[in-house]
Amino acid sequence: MESRRGVSSSQARSLYWLVAIYIQLLLLVESSQNRNLQQASRKRRLQPYTDNTNTIRHGPAMKSFQVSDGSWVDCVRIEQQIASHHPILKGHIIQISPPSYMNWQQNHIESQSRGLHPQLFAREHGGCPEGCIPVERRDPKQPLLRKFHTLQLHETPHEYATTGLQSSKAPYKGSRAVLSVNKPKLGKPKLDYSISQLWLVAGQPLNTIEVGWQVGGWQGSHSYPQLKTLLSPRLFIYWTADNYNITGCYDLTCSGFVQINNKWVLGGTLSTLNINTKKEQEISVVVAYDSMIPGWWLSISDTTIGYWPSSLYTALNSSATNLLWGGEVYPAGQKATAMGSGAFPDKGYPLAAYQRCVKYADSSKTFFNATLQNKFVSHANCYNSSVQQGGFTDWGSYFFFGGPGCIKHP
């Protein structure tokens, strides 16, 4: 009897543990289902904010901050950002989580000991609350800043010092570079501008994505209390799908780009610590295509900012045919406007402006060092570009560019 009771007790214990494990599995499945349902319910869709004027604009500010440069930043709900007004993006589900390959073959040396540039708003205020994005406040009475020219490198009055890859039928799926951040002098601060950027280009009419920093040229879309703000380098993005005609704009001044980051202000001032000193300041820029969205994702200094949905484009909807890197200047006045740091490339490091770790991605989702050969300089006596490779072990493909500019004669 004791033996039978012992067997019965052992069986009972086994049955107990089987039931317990089964119940635990049921609870895990139910928990997973509930979590999936909660995640689905938390999916954010673009929802255009409208008022009595039916103006295309961001939603109302949930919180506002004044930055030390005198500008204001409004925190708006991510669902009510201006991208929600684009007819193609009606009901668009915001992709909160960036694709994992935004760090394709990330080389940690790119940001190692380089003092990557903090943005002023993020450094001073830490960012907006979760669920909001920062938007630079703009005077609604001022016209929007637009690029009013085509990307024809032989045209004036725009000046260029660029390098790039040869036009290719093989699709380019990404571009990246680390840009030195400088503070070039402008001949006419309220009209001129000076830029360091990268371009992704495709099609006719021209489709572009452009990212970098810019000094000046902001009188059309910003109202600042002090002139010094115009002279500070500012982060910018730009896009067009019709050769700068109707589509596209700077930053978040029109519907298109979908921002998900709550710290970086597109159009906002970059910290000007150590500008034009021997300790360089930099930003790392990555633009990479994702076929799952589909769209082009933007990362600044290892922080994902947001993306351009492919539906915005006609030719740049899945790949680029040309990649460019370098500087652009618009000298409106007769005084010289500098590009980069204002030094010619032959001054080298650390005096001349540069872009390093210049890479491109192909359809295999792999970044390669770019063999820079498609150089263009509009006026070599004003600005120039000098391609280098292998001079610094952690710079990969790189080039120096810029110059003091030339005095224009009437």
Image (cartoon, rainbow, N blue to C red):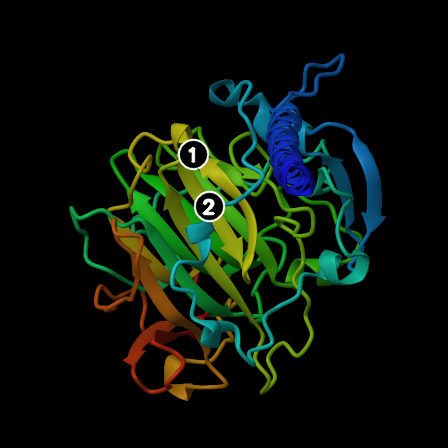
**Residue 186 location in percent, x, y?**
57, 65
Q: Which mark is residue 293?
A: 1
Q: How many numbered callouts? A: 2
- Whether residue 153 appears in this view of the structure is no
Quadrant containing the N terminus is top right
The answer to which of 403 and 178 lies nearer the viewer is 178
| Residue at screen point 72% across, 14% down | 53
Kind of residue at disc 1:
Ile
The answer to which of 105 and 201 lies nearer the viewer is 105
SS for dot 1: loop
Left/right of residue 241 with respect to residue 133 in the rendered view: left
SS for dot 2: loop
Q: Which mark is residue 99?
A: 2
Marks 2/1 in contact by CB < 8 Å: the verdict is yes
Where, by quadrant of the figure, is residue 42 drawn? top right
| Residue at screen point 68% across, 70% down | 272
Kind of residue at disc 2:
Pro
Q: Check disc 2: other Cα within 10 Å, few if <14, some if 14-19, many if 20+.
A: some
Q: Residue furthest left?
A: 169
Q: CA distance from mark 2 to mark 1?
A: 9 Å
Left/right of residue 230 with respect to residue 406 in the rendered view: right
**Residue 327 location in percent, x, y?**
42, 63
**Residue 34 location in percent, x, y?**
65, 27
| Residue at screen point 37% across, 52% down | 199
- Whether residue 86 appears in this view of the structure is yes
- Ranked by sequence position, the earlier of labels 2 and 1 is 2
Q: Check disc 1: other Cα within 10 Å, few if <14, some if 14-19, many if 20+.
A: some
Q: Is residue 339 above or below residue 140?
A: below
